[in-house]
Amino acid sequence: MKIAVLGSGVVGETLASRLVEVGHEVRMGSRTANNEKAAAWVAKSGPRAGQGTFAAVSAWAELVISAVHGEATLAALRSTGAESLAGKVLVDVANRLDFSKGMPPVSGAHDGDSLAEQIQREFPRARVVKSLNTMNCRIMVAPQLVPGDHDVFLSGNDAAAKDVVRGILRQFGWPDANILDLGDVTTARGPENMMPMWIRVWGAFGNVPFNVHWVRAKA
Amino acid sequence: MKIAVLGSGVVGETLASRLVEVGHEVRMGSRTANNEKAAAWVAKSGPRAGQGTFAAVSAWAELVISAVHGEATLAALRSTGAESLAGKVLVDVANRLDFSKGMPPVSGAHDGDSLAEQIQREFPRARVVKSLNTMNCRIMVAPQLVPGDHDVFLSGNDAAAKDVVRGILRQFGWPDANILDLGDVTTARGPENMMPMWIRVWGAFGNVPFNVHWVRAKA
C-alpha cells in the first residue's frame, strides 16, 4: 500500500521505518521538500522509501498517517488540501501536549472534544481513525516489547477504514484480541485523555516499555 | 479504626459496608442527621455502623473518606469545618462528572488541576490521598471480581497517609503488587483524567466487571 507518514520526528520515523519493513511503499512528509531528516531517512531506508511536502506525499498516498505534534496537526493537514485526503483513510496518532512549561508536558485533552473529531469536522471526506496515541512509539510498532496482554484502540466513524488500520496493526504484531474498537470518532476522547495518566505512570515506572490493558471478567 | 464515609449514594454505601465487614467502626455522613438512606444502612449494618451529619461524623472519625459526587465534594468538606479534618487522612474517591446532558456523563477533569489538589489547597492540614476513583465501586471493595492483575492508584503528599490507605486496600483484597503509588497529590491528575477512557471502555465492554492494568517490561 502507498502510505504517507506526515512528520519526520521520532514517531513519524519509527512508523515509516516499520511500514517499509512490513512491505509498504512509504513517503515521509514535511513542511518543505528535501527536509534534512526526511532525506536522511530515505537514504537509509531503501527503494520503497521516499519523501516530499505534506501536500505531495498526501496526494500520492492511498493512506495517510498524521504523526506531527498534536498542536501542529491541523495546520499540516490544511497544507495538504482537502482533495488529497478525500476518500482516504487518515490515521491520527497525535496527542496535544504543551512542552512550554518543561517536563512533564501538560496535556491539552479534555472530555468536551478531541483532535480526531476536529480533524473529521474539518475534513469530512477523510476517513479518520484515531489509534496508537496511547503509547511510546517503540511499542506501537513492536508490541512484543511489553509482555502479555496490552491494548491498542481504534476510534472512527468508518468501519472499513478501521479494518484497514486493524490490518496494519496486525502487520506490526498486534494480536486481534488486543485491538479494541471503541466506536465512533467521538470515542477518541477516551484515548486522548489517557495522556495525563500515561505521564504519571511513566513517572512511576521510568523508561521501561509499558502499556495499558483493560481487563474484564467473562460476561 | 473509626472511619467516616461522606456520602450515602452507592459508592458511599458500598465502601461503608465493606469497611464494617473488615472490622472498622463506620459512620456514614450526610447533609442532614437521620438521612433516610443513611438510617436504612445503619439499621441493616449492625453495631459498628452509625450515621450523622458530615460535620458530626468527621469530628468523630480518625480517617475520612469523601464519597460524595465530585461536584459536591468541596461543599461537603467545607461543612465539616477544617478543624475536623486537621491531621486526619482524607481519602478522595470522587470524579467530577456532568450528567446534565444525559449518558454518558462528561468528565470535568483536565491536566491543569485536580479535585484532590483543590481539596489539599483548601484543607492544608488534611492528609489528602486520592485513590479508587478509576473503577466501579463493586471492584473497589472486591478486586477479585476482575481476573488477574489490575491496578489501584495512590496520590498524595504524605507517605504515612498513603500507607494507611494501602492497609485498607489490602483489607479489601488488593495485592501489594497492584497498588501503585504515583507520587504527590498533583499526580491525581492522572487517575482523574482516566474517566473519559473508562466511559468509552464501559461502552465497548458493557456491564461486566473491568479495570485497568498498566503492564511493564522488566527493567
Image (tube, coloured by chain):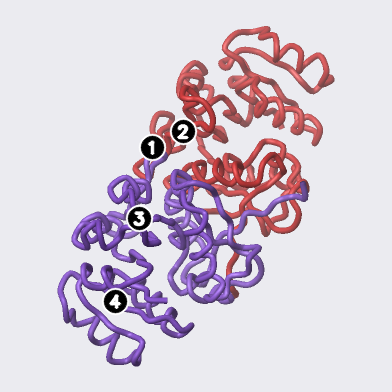
Chain colours: A red, B purple
Label placed on residue B126: 3
Give the tally of numbered discs: 4
Q: How far, Cα to Cα, is label 3 from label 1?
A: 22 Å
Q: Is there one chain holding both mark 3 and mark 1?
A: yes
Q: Which of the two discs, 3 and 2, sits closer to the camera?
A: 3
Q: How far, Cα to Cα, is label 4 from label 3?
A: 19 Å
Q: How far, Cα to Cα, is label 3 from label 2?
A: 27 Å
Q: Specify the amino acid type for callout 1.
A: Gly
Q: Is residue B43 above or below residue A214?
A: below
Res. B69 in view? yes
Q: Could you say which is closer to the camera, residue A146 or residue B182?
A: B182
Q: Could you say which is closer to the camera, residue A165 or residue A37?
A: A37
Alpha-carbon neighbours of circle 4 within 10 Å: few (<14), some, or many (≥20)? many
Instruction: Give the residue pinned by disc 2.
Output: A106
Instruction: Give the residue pinned by disc 4.
Output: B28
Query: How far from the left and from the top, in percent, is residue B184?
Result: 49, 46
Alpha-carbon neighbours of circle 2 within 10 Å: few (<14), some, or many (≥20)? some
Image point (70%, 15%), residue name? A38
Query: How far from the left and from the top, in percent, is residue B128?
Result: 40, 55
Image point (21%, 59%), residue name? B81
Q: How far, Cα to Cα, is label 4 from label 1?
A: 32 Å
* Chain bearing mark 3: B
Q: Could you say which is closer to the camera, residue A95 or residue A90?
A: A95
Indicate the quadrant where residue B43 lies: bottom left
Left or right for B103, reference B111: left
Instruction: Give the residue pinned by disc 1.
Output: B112
Q: Could you say which is closer to the camera, residue B102 or residue B41?
A: B41
Query: How far from the left and from the top, in percent, is residue A180?
Result: 59, 55
**N-term-proximal mark, 3 vs 1:** 1
Q: Specify the amino acid type for callout 3.
A: Ala
